[in-house]
Image: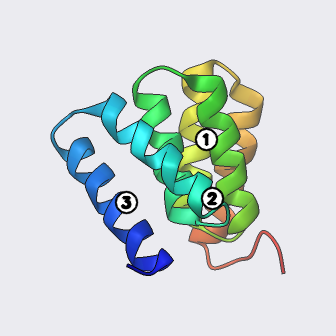
Amino acid sequence: MAADEALDALFDEANGHLALGELDEAVALYRRCVEIAPDCFDAWHALGMGLMKIGNLREAIGCGLKAVTLRPNDLLAWTSLSQMYVRDGNIPEAESAKANARILSLGGKVVR
């Protein structure tokens, strides 16, 4: 199996666990995805969301920051990062991330 196929299979398996509400299992598999492919936006984003759902907010924010670094003009990434900051009680950073999401929702760019 090629590396891309292995990553896809692992990511699909993680998504299956997520769909069943098996968050710890999903997070463990998403962690393996980012180890295999450190530049995989989808894996970082999914890992961050999974970590947020299990309450590991600091690490979730780190993953969210990695996601927006990989895709600085991704609306979903900024929206998710804002949610992570809100859950962590960091309202200034949440508002900043939300502002970037708003710029993108209006057709602008965060990074040109």
**Amino acid at dot 1:** Ser
Which residue is disc 2 drawn over? 101
Considering only vertical position in the picture, is 46 above or below 51?
A: below
Considering only vertical position in the picture, is 13 above or below 110?
A: above
Would residue 62 be found to the left or right of residue 22 on screen? Answer: right
Considering only vertical position in the picture, is 42 above or below 66?
A: below
Q: Position of residue 20 (x, y in %)?
A: 15, 40
Considering only vertical position in the picture, is 57 above or below 63?
A: above
Mark closer to the chain start, 2 or 3 = 3
- Point 57% across, 34% down: residue: 84
**Amino acid at dot 2:** Ala
Circle nearer the viewer, 3 or 1: 3
Which residue is disc 3 drawn over? 11
Q: Residues within 10 Å of mark 1 (few under 14, many from 20)?
A: many
**Amino acid at dot 3:** Phe
Q: Position of residue 10 (x, y in %)?
A: 36, 59
Q: Secondary structure at mark 1?
A: helix
Would residue 47 be found to the left or right of residue 8 on screen? Answer: right
The reply to whether the C-beta atoms of the residues labelled 2 and 3 are less than 8 Å apart is: no
- Point 35% across, 29% down: residue: 24
Q: Spatial distance from mark 1 to mark 2, Cα to Cα?
A: 9 Å
Q: Residue furthest right?
A: 112
- Point 82% across, 73% down: residue: 111
Q: Residues within 10 Å of mark 2 (few under 14, many from 20)?
A: many
Which residue is disc 1 drawn over? 82
Mark closer to the chain start, 1 or 2 = 1
Quadrant into which the C terminus falls: bottom right
Q: Secondary structure at mark 3?
A: helix
